[in-house]
Amino acid sequence: MPRVSREKLKEISNLMKSKDAIRNIGIIAHVDHGKTTLSDRLLSAGGIISDGLAGTLLYLDYLEVEKKRRMTVKSASCTFIYSGSDMKLLVNLVDTPGHIDFSGYVSRSLRLVDSVILVVDAVEGVMVQTENYLRLALKEMVKPLLFINKVDRLILELQYNGDEIRKRVAEIIGDVNQLIEAFLPERYSNWRIKADKGMILGSALDGWGVTAEIARETGVRIKNIVEAYRRGEKLSSKLPLHKAVMMEVYKSAPSPLEAQAYRVAALWDGKLGDAERKAVASCSDEGPLIAVVGNIDFDSSGRPIPTIRIFSGSISHGTELYLVGAGARSKVQAVYIPVGKGKAQVERVLAGNIAVCTGIKKVFSGETIVGSDAREVKPVEPPYYLSEPVVYVTIEPENPSDVEKVTAELEKLRLREPLIGYQVDEETGEIVVHGVGELQLEIVAGFIAEIAPVRTGEPTVVLREKATENSGDIAVVSPDGSCKLTLVCQPIERAQMNGGNIIKTEMECILKAPHTLEVDRELMRRVLLEFSRRGPLCGEPVWRSFFEIKEAVCRGKLNAAQVLAALARGLIKSFLAAKPILFEPVGEIEVYTPLELVGVVEGVLRKRRCNIHTISSTGVYSVVKGEIPLSETFGLSSELRAATSGRAIYTIQLSGYRQMEKSAAERAMEERRRRRGYLSGLS
């Protein structure tokens, strides 16, 4: 970690007071479009790394798995000062992953920043994750700038001339603006990208960049850039990328003082009181402390180190906090600014800035933090996630005594990434770990293997069990015979919700109970939740099914325990009578490939039960789009790479669930029932 001098820390602390001089900037892009390389260039300009290493060091990819895979798998932040000829900015830079499996980090990182640099490969153009991450940014009211990267590819690989490059740039700007117009109200039409506003053209790897203003000042034209490449001339000294980017950031990216005035409504959806709302909108250092946790790291002892965006007030050593979500008090031990993998201690961090804190207990990603005397402040709106945990693996420690150690590590991962979950089978010691995709779980398993030898199972998708018909009246009796319940189960689409107590689970399982049944709603919800987590078909979650207690007849004094036991039986019997079937998660897939390999790609996809919807052309690629069961995507990367000699790239995003074909459902059900030790039959 580079050492930050005392003089530099003092200068940073002073700049925190000048809200107009602060820029909180994120970098988002489709995977491999050049986010972290761009980060290197900006960090070198801020004195964090040397110019010679910029573009190749990938400084913010400091985890071993990132260095090995050359892929960002988490978010990382860095604070630095950028000095130009007529400006001095305090920059809080946040680099994010591009792969969909790690998109949860992007969702939470957008809480930390006010604008993003959207990086787009000039050849590949706007791709699926480009669109998804831009949509996330706009939902958070984070203003985009556009960096069209890898222009060198247009010149060297495609042999484009100046006119062709201008046409390609106009196409990309048009595609980005279509998304901005689709996702934002008309009053934000000034956020649209223009050739002379909010756009940088260049090559992060080669270290050069140009804006319309720089072109006017220097007289450089696109044809000059093409000629320079033909001559083998370096452009980084004449047109340094960091200057182009930071000039545009200075002109077009909002300060926290400007951004928080309109972001407060999106982040709290009108739930803040007048005093708190005004303090956030004005980015007040003297207002009540209101902050949001973006991401969490851990020290060598396993203690959490959250990265926090302060919207109002300030944080310093000894600040007493209240964690709104956890409902707990805590106290700051020390406060720092982030410097990539490390951190530099400061006395105080003010509103509009990003802080790293130690000493805060019971904290999790997305938590709202307020002053210890401000418990009435409402939490920030939960972040919007592009995907959900639909894949799992089993992890079994070879030594049973390591179960506690492994679960402690998984708990840290869960706090850092809420889209990771786990359960422990107390009898076998086997741990089921849930995640977004195969790659994420592969990396989680790698982290676990570093602390204890484990056996890891093959990735498996989470299916859904769903009622398809009306069960008719199903009567069940409690164990002691004192209570008789009559239940009906049917698909949620046919349900009548009016009247009665409505009890819901997160899987859209709903129970309707009569008001006359005087049993605690929370107890009934727990029974419903336990049932819905492991359905009777094969132990998969029960989904979008509606249950109604039509009649409850109890002799003598009502015994809640007996009613709940009858309810548990009735849920199973009525559900099985409603002819349940299995649904599987499916994803929208886009494969980008040269025209001559479209047939090869089609063959690979169709073999994996993919429904191909369209085949089109964009730039130099043909794009094959379709819908594929996520269970058929395991190993797809290797197969496509082998079939196309690495010339095809693809993205998949969860799109929903569809009914499984009968033969596939029977195989899946048999395998899961056998693995989970279910008895034969469904009664």
Image: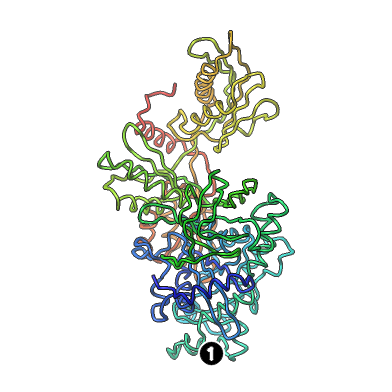
Residue 261 is situated, as x and y percent measured from the top left of the image, at 69, 62
Whether residue 181 is visible, yes or no, is yes
Relative to 496, is 302 on the left or the right?
A: left
Residue 542 is situated, as x and y percent measured from the top left of the image, at 51, 33
Residue at 34 percent across and 62 percent down: it is: 64
Q: Residues within 10 Å of mark 1 (few under 14, many from 20)?
A: few
Taking 337 as reference, is 485 above or below it?
above
Placement of the C terminus among the 4 image quadrants: top left
Residue 676 is situated, as x and y percent measured from the top left of the image, at 36, 32
Mark 1: which secondary structure?
helix
Residue at 64 percent across and 74 percent down: it is: 252
Taking 428 as reference, is 184 above or below it?
below
Placement of the N terminus among the 4 image quadrants: bottom left
Taking 220 as reference, is 7 above or below it?
above
Q: How many marks?
A: 1
Q: Choose top left, top right, bottom left or bottom right for residue 165.
A: bottom right
Task: Looking at the picture, tell me which residue is in the foreground, 287 or 178.
Answer: 287
Q: How is the protein colored in the picture?
A: rainbow
Taking 178 as reference, is 531 above or below it?
above
The outermost residue toward the top is: 556
The outermost residue toward the right is: 187
Whether residue 123 is visible, yes or no, is no
Residue at 65 percent across and 79 percent down: it is: 196
Relative to 279, is 15 on the left or the right?
A: left
Residue 636 is situated, as x and y percent measured from the top left of the image, at 39, 54
Identity of the amino acid at label 1?
Asn
Task: Looking at the picture, tell me which residue is in the foreground, 89 or 551.
Answer: 89
Relative to 176, is 530 on the left or the right?
A: left
Q: Which residue has dot 1 on it?
A: 224
